[in-house]
Amino acid sequence: MRASNAGRAPWLWMLGIAVAFVALVIPAIVAGGGGTSQANDMMDYHAIEIRRIETQWPTPDLRDAFTTTTPGFHLVLAGLAKLGCSALALRVIAALAGLAAWLVAWRVAVVWCGAARATLLIAPMAVSPYVLGSAIWLTTDASALALGAATMGLALVGWRRSREAWATAVLGAGTVLVRQIMLWCIVPGVLRAWMDGGRLSTRARGVAKVALPAVTCVIAFVLLWGGSMPPRFQPFHQAVWNPGAITFSLAMAGACGIFLLPWIWGRLDRTARRGALVAAALGLAMAAAPRSDYRKVLPPDAQRVGTRTENTWGPTAPDVVKGAGEVGRWGGPLWDVAKVAPTVAGRSTLLVGLAALGGAVLAGLWSLADRAGRGRSALMLLAAMAGMVASQSLNAQTFERYFDPWVLLSIGWLAAMAMPRARERSLSVGLLLLTIAQLGMTLAVVLKPAFTGPTLGDW
């Protein structure tokens, strides 16, 4: 990666980041508590899948899987388990993916704004309950975040050598081997290959080089499964189109971006402000089109057969739908707030309003990045986020965990691209408040259960 104005990434900063991660995550793993959705996912799905692959090694059945994702994460850990690693050791090793996600996100931001500012910009994502929760309890989220961020980051900062384009292709394939739905992470690489390729034939070869490895992997598993995920999960997750993903992604951008809005608005000129207002109107219209009211949907019993908690749910509550082919709009703090907020004709007034704000925030950040000479990279990142929303609209469930880390990462990177040379207090204050909000949620819903929740035991 190219060096920023601050010079090469200081190793002392990276060491400090690693120390902070270890201090937050490793004691929580050793404590052994659970009781969260991520802990349940580890015990009900990921742990079962790792042990299943381990017992079938070296020829595991990759079709009848106990998780919704491609098996790359589970194959690696099953191989380590076969070598004698304990469950605790596997959790510690898997947690390193969370550290990798921190360092990748930070290192990319350093290219644009320097080490100190990059730390502040990435901090909200780093302490997100979904990032740290995935590191503490063994799920695929942190690994996918690390690989996906590296895939996009290489393309966003630009390739100086052919090997960097090849690295983007390899990382893209690695990303979809952990989570097939994240094919959108290759969008910046595809755009970079097209825009920097010169002649048409050169551009086509560049696009093929970047895209084919990841696309081939996804196609192979779609053919193997007969759908976008293993058969066990297809009725719950892939049954219907879910346009609520558009509303929720924009609302997440608004909920996170509101902390930066005073800084953004204060730096926009009159023309850019008009553009931001137009983007707000478009965001409002797009968010108001589909339903966005709270709707909790639980999977059919068949999905849980063979898991440790298959018989623990009991009767379904009156306001909960249980079955296949149903769109779910729930799962996360923002959905919990939306549940009690007013709705009009099936539209959440909170989410629609935040979506309008999200449109203004993203447009404003692009304008500032463009003024700083990084408009093309900002557009590439926004294109990737559009790909993320399109992919998630193919998932019937709109869980907040699918959106939160990527929205926070995108806002952090866009702000890094737009960063001026001079320090600006309003930005620092906004980022600090956003980090405190994220850390507060993490303390309540991740770290507290990790230390005081029911003991998970071995697996």
Image (tube, rainbow, N blue to C red):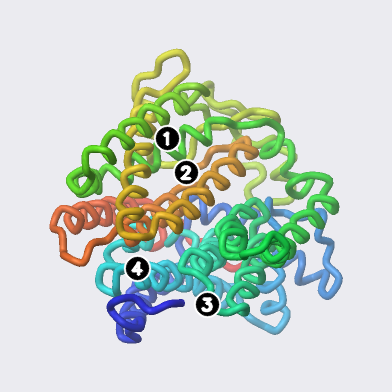
The image's mark for residue 335 is 1
Q: Secondary structure at mark 4?
A: helix
Q: Position of residue 443 (x, y in %)?
A: 32, 56
Few, some or many residues within 10 Å of mark 1 (<14, 14–19, 20+) = many
The answer to whether one can see residue 185 in this image is: no
The Cα atoms of the two marked residues, 4 and 1, are separated by 34 Å
Does residue 151 appear left or right of residue 342 in this picture?
Answer: right
Q: Secondary structure at mark 1?
A: helix
Q: Position of residue 73 (x, y in %)?
A: 65, 67
Pointers 2 and 4 in contact (CB under 8 A)? no
Amino acid found under the numbered disc labelled 2: Glu
Q: Secondary structure at mark 2?
A: helix
Compared to residue 426, the image places residue 117 above or below, namely below
The Cα atoms of the two marked residues, 3 and 1, are separated by 43 Å
Q: Nearer the viewer, residue 314 or 63?
A: 63
Compared to residue 208, the image places residue 351 above or below, namely above
The Cα atoms of the two marked residues, 2 and 4, are separated by 29 Å
Q: Which residue is labeled 4 in the image?
A: 112
Few, some or many residues within 10 Å of mark 2 (<14, 14–19, 20+) = many
Amino acid found under the numbered disc labelled 1: Trp
Q: Which residue is labeled 2 in the image?
A: 400
* Quarter of the image that includes the C terminus: bottom right
Q: Nearer the viewer, residue 152 or 306?
A: 152
